[in-house]
Image (tube, rainbow, N blue to C red):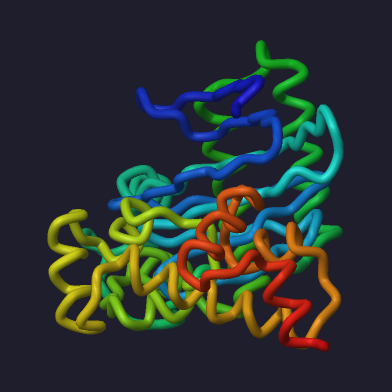
Amino acid sequence: MILDRQTFEYDGRVLVEKIKIGTPFKYEAIFENSGCFIYYKDRAPKLLSADQNIQVNSQEAVLLKCGSHFLEILKETEDEEVEAMIVHLYPEILKKLYAKELPKNIEKNNYNEQSEIVVSKEVISRFIESLEFYFQNPVLINDDLLELKVKELILLLMQSKNVSSIQELISDLYSTRSVQVKKVIELHRYSNLGLDELAKLCNLSLSSFKREFKKEFNDTPNNYITDQKLKRAKELLRITEMPVSEIAYGVGFNDPLYFTRTFKKKIGLSPTVYRQRETT
């Protein structure tokens, strides 16, 4: 849940925003025609996309490219709040800022296909601090300052990505990628993503996703994914001493009670009884 949101606009669009969220939280970040830079101050999310399922570290930033992404933060303590800073990288605005350096039309090249983790913590932290100053003093903000901050960010990203030019960075940011349903499912079979969210990662409507899934796995998405989660859960029950609730979260259930009911319905035994029978 978003608890607070402050924004700076440029050309009628939100260019920079600062949000405070309460956990647990899943941010649906879908960018069809823009890139996005996101920095989490204290707690970092898990990045889920068509080709990635990774845990970002605290005080690291993520450069999200065109496509569908989900950023998920689980709750660790009561009344937990997390702050994030977001800079939207619209191609039209970047072409305006770099009119002399960029071609009239951004070319669709294939460089690195994945979203980037920006790991230069100290440099990025200083950049975030400068944005914090302007959110504390919003009367100072104008279009000229916003243009300077975007150019500063681009220069930092170029250094962290080791690209040789603005053209390469922008082409990389907006490069198109093909998405395979099988790859997405294999990557996220233990993630807490619904069918709608999986369909978005595949750039498909829900109905098209179900049809493609049936062709690939000869099963319905709900049945196949549930079976895969329970298969992994049985393995963890046999070979570890992890609590049942921890196993439930680990295989992609957000409710341990629902996990237990589903397990008993499919396997015929509760997780606890199954563990006792398999380990004695």
Residue 115 shown left or right of residue 103 in the figure: right
Asked if residue 222 is positioned above or below residue 112 in the image, the reply reads above
Does any portion of residue 152 appear in the rendered image?
Answer: no
User: Looking at this view, is 87 or 103 the one in front?
Assistant: 87
- The quarter of the rendered structure image containing the N terminus is top right
Residue at x 61% of width, y 57% of height: 260
Vertical arrangement, residue 8 with respect to residue 253, above or below: above
| Extreme-top residue of the structure | 139
**Does residue 66 sit above or below 20 in this rendering?**
below
- Give how far across and how far down residue 164 sits, in percent: 53, 79
Residue ID at (55%, 54%): 261
119, 210: nearer the viewer: 210
- Asked if residue 248 lies left or right of residue 177, the reply is right
- x then y, percent, for residue 35: 43, 54
How many numbered discs? 0
- Quadrant (top left/top right/bottom left/bottom right) for the C terminus: bottom right
In the rendered image, residue 257, in percent from the top left (x then y), is placed at 63, 48
Which quadrant holds residue 23?
top right
Residue 189 relative to residue 255: left or right: left
Q: Can residue 248 be seen by looking at this rendering? A: yes
